[in-house]
Image (spheres, rainbow, N blue to C red):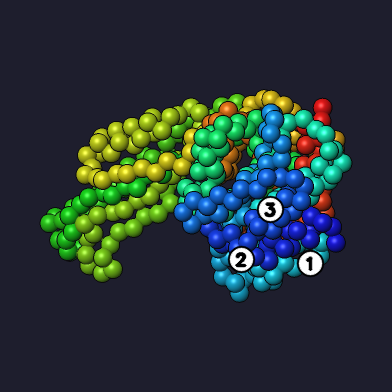
Amino acid sequence: MSMTLDLAIDLISRPSITPDDQGCQEVIARRLQTLGFEIQHLRFGQVDNLWARCGHTAPLLVLAGHTDVVPVGPVEAWQFPPFTPTLHQGNLYGRGIADMKGGLAAMVTACERFLQANTQHKGSLAFLITSDEEGLAVDGTAKVVDYLQQQGQSIEWCLLGEPASVDKLGDQIKNGRRGSLTGILTILGRQGHAAYPHLADNPIHRFAPLLQELCQHTWDQGNAFFPPTTFQVVNVQAGTGADNVIPGQLEVIFNFRYNTEFTVADLQQAVIQRLKAHHLQYELSWRHSGHPFLTAQGQLLEAVRLVIKEVCGYETALSTGGGTSDGRFIAPTGAQVIELGLLNRTIHQVNECVNIEDLDKLSVLYERILERLLLE
């Protein structure tokens, strides 16, 4: 059994459902400490975070990720128990193996080989690991980045182990992400008897034309780096539970995944203008999860692309699609941020799994990237 596989099995056997770390970071910290890393366990609220650094000079390369995982869903739907690592037909099964404990294991073993073979290298190497990426993401990477800035520690390059690959390892990397803006909207009407609609004001009927307008609207065409902005309704709730009562209000939660063609203020104003144009009575609040970010060029992107070509034999594709990542907290500091990890086809699903050979190959990719950035 390879060292990467062995560590991955240890990590996924720990039921670290967000934000509970379940000792994963301590396992990683012990291995890094033997390599000379200075270990800091940073706990904010109920969230465990690990900052481990080896070296004191610039440039600083950070390997980043998270130990928390999403809930398993219906256990009976899993082929194997989700926190009992299982090897089957060339795959390793377990909740969090793809997203992203396999990536973390590959990062640790890559770092071990690199430092054992290269006692002299330029710059510094660090790990930033949180247990609050799959949850609220309030007391995790965002707080650690604030702490690092207060300490005067500046990140030059950040390699995130998020599962960005699609059909084969390294065929896609993320060099940015869209922003995420959520609206919590209440349409106000007047409750009444379903048989006497003239005495009521149905908020569902009121909102329906605007909903169609919002869903059919083309917000933009995207640009050279980002896909188009999207609008999605993620929850709708109304009614009293009775089939003869017109509800007095309708609650709608919607989400924008937006690119650099828009600002948060632009999107908010666009929604408010439409609400007013439809003469709706409403209450509206917003939750902003992160601005779009992009690493369009730089040494990190160049190194990752060259290494994938050398090791895998094909060119990687750049993507800024998908959800958000903790890169949104790191990129605004001026750091170059790239996401490279395992295949994402089973993440957040039952029977989450990865190809066993990909674990070792990913570790090699990470090691070669370290060599390109810290030796040349």
Left of 163 or right of it: where is 182?
left
Residue 118 versus residue 357 in the image, above or below: above
Left of 358 or right of it: where is 212?
left
Going from N to C along the chain, the mark reached first, 2 or 1, is 2
Splitting the image into 4 quarters, where does residue 247 fall? Answer: bottom left
Question: Which residue carries the number 2 mark?
Answer: 15
Residue sitting at x 50%, y 43%:
143
Q: Nearer the viewer, mark 3 or mark 1?
A: 3
Residue sitting at x 61%, y 65%:
15
Residue 147 placement (x, y as % from top left): 52, 40
For the residues labelled 2 and 1, the Cα–Cα distance comes to 20 Å
For the residues labelled 3 and 1, the Cα–Cα distance comes to 29 Å
Question: Which residue carries the number 1 mark?
Answer: 88
Residue 253 placement (x, y as % from top left): 38, 50
Q: Secondary structure at mark 2?
A: loop
Closer to the camera in the image, 127 or 360: 127
Residue type marked 1: His
> In the orientation shown, which residue stands out farthest toward the bottom?
76
For the residues labelled 2 and 3, the Cα–Cα distance comes to 18 Å
Say which quadrant the N terminus sits in.
Answer: bottom right
Residue 63 placement (x, y as % from top left): 68, 42
Q: Secondary structure at mark 1?
A: strand
Residue type marked 2: Pro
Residue 59 versus residue 126 in the image, above or below: above
Residue sitting at x 82%, y 61%:
90
- Mark 3, Cα crowd under 10 Å, few <14 / some 14-19 / many 20+, is many
Question: Which residue carries the number 3 mark?
Answer: 29
Q: Nearer the viewer, mark 2 or mark 3?
A: 3
Kindly tell me whether residue 375 is visible in this rendering.
Answer: yes
